Amino acid sequence: MFKIGDFSKLSSISIRMLRHYDKVELLQPVKVDEQSGYRFYSAAQLKKVNQIQVLKDMGFNIATIKELVESENIEVIKSQFENRSAQVKEEMDDLKKQLRLLEDSMKTMREDVIEMNYHVSLKEIPERNVASVRKVIPSYNCEGDLWSILMQEINVKNISIANPSYSIATFHDQEYKENDVDVEIQINILGEHENTKDVNFKKIDPSYVASITVNGSYEQMTAVNEAAAKWIETEGYELAGPMFNIYHVIPAMESDPNKWVTEVCYPINK
């Protein structure tokens, strides 16, 4: 058997952490001297130590590690690994987004650009006949699912798309949301058609909007909204409906985010 100090060296775990593991009953000494209180560990426990360290490096918390090292049910272990894998992938997506923001900011500083100027213009969107799909989707990233539904219906019914097509996504929620978002997509069509299970055919009245054409990725939206809000307030307008995007160059057409072109529209009135 080994005293706690020696076992600490053998296991590469600090005495403080070994005492914590003992307290939470994750790794307890095989013997505690009643008179001195000294803790003693065995060589056989190093295998468990290695398991604990590997699980810790995977990012599991102490409670989950305790459950895993005590479990003999392979399905329980597999389930925990799958859950952790999904969590890591989500964290990686968040980190990639943070990295892109850092890189964009550094690029801006290198180019000595203090503030990006977005040109806001008053524009009339004319009356139009549209094919529309509106659903609550898990997140904005799922918008492509709506376009798949719409384009499939257009192809099945052999519907002619008007020119300009005005490929539009309208965001109907009354507040900002990241999940379960109410999104409607529309595309201009020729002729009149009967509604189907998923697609609604309707006429949209003309409207005036404050319009900003954005070149590049959608991560600019905070700055775009700020520019639009300042213009709307300065010019004495009020918002008159949910904002929408008109897509000119989309990810499906161009993989390079720097080449995307989106017209962001804010319905307004005096």
Image: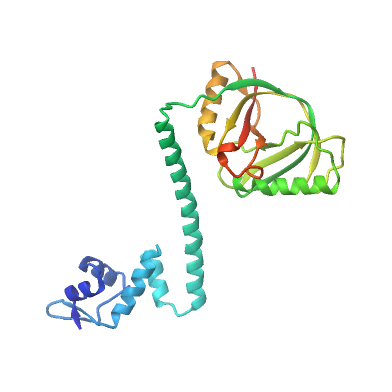
Residue that protrudes farthest toward the left in the picture: 36
Image position, residue 76 (x, y; %):
49, 73
Residue at left offset 29%, top offset 80%: 45
Residue 64, visible in the rendered structure: yes
Instruction: Examine the rendered structure and indicate whether residue 122 appears above or below residue 82.
Output: above
Nearest the camera: 20 or 47? 47
Q: Is residue 249 above or below residue 116?
A: below
Identify the image quadrant of residue 158: top right
Q: Is residue 88 left or right of residue 132?
A: left
Tell me which residue sits at (40%, 65%) in the image. Answer: 58
Residue 242, by quadrant, is top right
| Residue 226 left/right relative to 134 | left
Q: Does the image show residue 176?
A: no
Q: Is residue 242 left or right of residue 90?
A: right
The image position of residue 236, as x and y in percent, is: 58, 16
Please tell me how many numbered marks the rendered image carries: 0
Q: Where is residue 119, by image quadrant?
A: top right
Q: Residue at x 54, y 34 (%)?
A: 221
Q: Quadrant of the C terminus?
A: top right
Q: Position of residue 166 (x, y in %)?
A: 73, 33
Q: Residue 5: x and y, percent?
A: 17, 73
- Which residue is rendered at x = 61% and y = 50% of the image? 138
Point out the image quarter for the N terminus: bottom left
Question: Looking at this view, is 192 or 120 the one in front?
Answer: 120
Relative vertical location of residue 148 with respect to residue 16 in this rendering, above or below: above
Name the image colouring. rainbow
